[in-house]
Image (cartoon, helix red, strand yellow):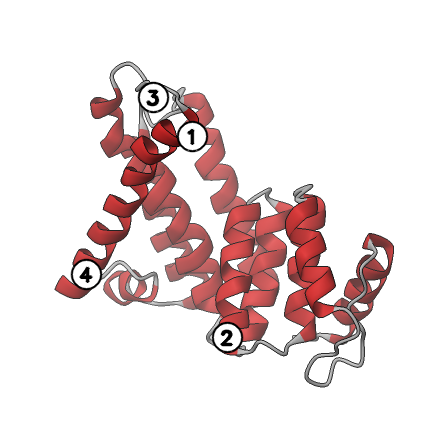
């Protein structure tokens, strides 16, 4: 089952990027079509790999009706993010410019960059890992996949979320250090390395050092200890 999950994730990733490339959807120009193809692929994969009916598969992927609270929270966060644009412009004395035809691109960007990608990596991958693993272990494995596919921001967000619930887990900190290392984020790497220097996690038996070499060695050792 584990092999089928990883192969299907790889196949869904290829479907996402190959369809976007074939349709020239760099900025969501054909994002609705790409999103529809990827969502259909996720439903089929959920049906074939886990034997679930399509309605149950949709629920497992997180494609249910959102609550009023979640919509208001999303609206609030989105508004706050948009407000950073004029604030940044004021602080840097820059004049922001919008991409030509940006309103027409919004539906495609939402479908392709939002719904499709989130369904593949969080709904399908992380959701199915949570069936047989703890939240932290599922986050650890998922973050590795995000890094392999160059999704450093998603890996960081998932690991930070896991660390909020288990701040002493050294394996999660090591994985986050490796994300920063591969993303060339030296500032975040140094901050986390200094904060975690000479501290160990729950049962990990390792020390978080401040050098990339020691971090890689410890991360490799931890990976060999985590089993399905």
Q: Can you give x and y, in whole percent of width and height, for residue 32 in the image?
A: 27, 33
Measured Cα–Cα span from mark 2 to mark 4: 22 Å
Asked if the residue under mark 2 is in contact with the one under mark 3, i.e. CB atoms within 8 Å, the reply is no
Residue at the spot of label 3:
96
- Tag 4 near tag 3, CB within 8 Å: no
Label 3 packing within 10 angstroms: few (<14), some (14-19), many (20+): few
At a point 64% along the width and 51% down the height, the residue shown is: 188
Quarter of the image where one finds residue 30? top left
Task: Please report whichever mark, 3 or 2, sits nearer to the chain's N-terminal start.
Answer: 3
Residue name at image x 43 percent, y 51 percent: 120
User: Which residue is located at x 34 percent, y 19 percent?
Assistant: 95
Percent x, y of residue 220: 80, 63
Q: Residue at x 75, y 67 (%)?
A: 223
Tell me: 214 left or right of 158: right
Please, what secondary structure does the residue beneath circle 2 have? Answer: helix
| Disc 3 versus disc 2: nearer the observer | 3
In the rendered view, does 53 fall on the left or right side of 3?
left
Q: Of marks 1 and 2, which one's residue comes earlier in the chain?
A: 1
Q: Which residue is mark 1?
A: 19
Q: CA distance from mark 3 to mark 1?
A: 31 Å
Q: Which residue is mark 2?
A: 135
Q: Earlier in the sequence, mark 1 or mark 4?
A: 1
Q: Crowding at label 4, few (<14), some or many (≥20) Cα neighbours within 10 Å?
A: few
Using the numbered discs, state the Cα–Cα distance from disc 3 to disc 2 in whole angstroms.
40 Å
Q: Position of residue 88 (x, y in %)?
A: 38, 33
The quadrant of the rendering that contains the C terminus is bottom right
- Please, what secondary structure does the residue beneath circle 4 have? loop
- Mark-to-mark CA distance, 1 and 2: 32 Å
């Amino acid at each position: 089952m584990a092999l089928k999950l990883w192969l299907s994730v790889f196949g869904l990733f290829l479907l996402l990027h190959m369809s976007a490339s074939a349709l020239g959807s760099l900025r969501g120009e054909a994002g609705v079509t790409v999103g529809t193809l990827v969502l259909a692929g996720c439903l089929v994969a959920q049906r074939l790999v886990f034997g679930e009916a399509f309605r149950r598969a949709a629920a497992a992927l997180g494609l249910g009706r959102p609550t009023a609270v979640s919509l208001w929270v999303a609206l609030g966060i989105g508004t706050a993010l948009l407000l950073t644009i004029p604030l940044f412009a004021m602080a840097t004395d820059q004049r922001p410019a919008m991409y030509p035809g940006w309103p027409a691109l919004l539906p495609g960007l939402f479908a392709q960059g939002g719904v499709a990608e989130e369904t593949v990596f969080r709904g399908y991958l992380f959701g199915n890992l949570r069936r047989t693993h703890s939240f932290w272990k599922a986050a650890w494995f998922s973050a590795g996949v995000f890094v392999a596919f160059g999704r450093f921001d998603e890996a960081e967000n998932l690991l930070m979320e896991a660390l909020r619930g288990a701040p002493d887990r050294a394996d999660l900190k090591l994985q986050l250090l490796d994300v920063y290392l591969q993303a060339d984020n030296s500032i975040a790497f140094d901050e986390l390395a200094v904060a975690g220097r000479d501290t160990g996690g729950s049962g990990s038996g390792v020390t978080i050092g401040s050098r990339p070499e020691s971090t890689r060695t410890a991360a490799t050792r931890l990976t060999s200890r985590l089993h399905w």
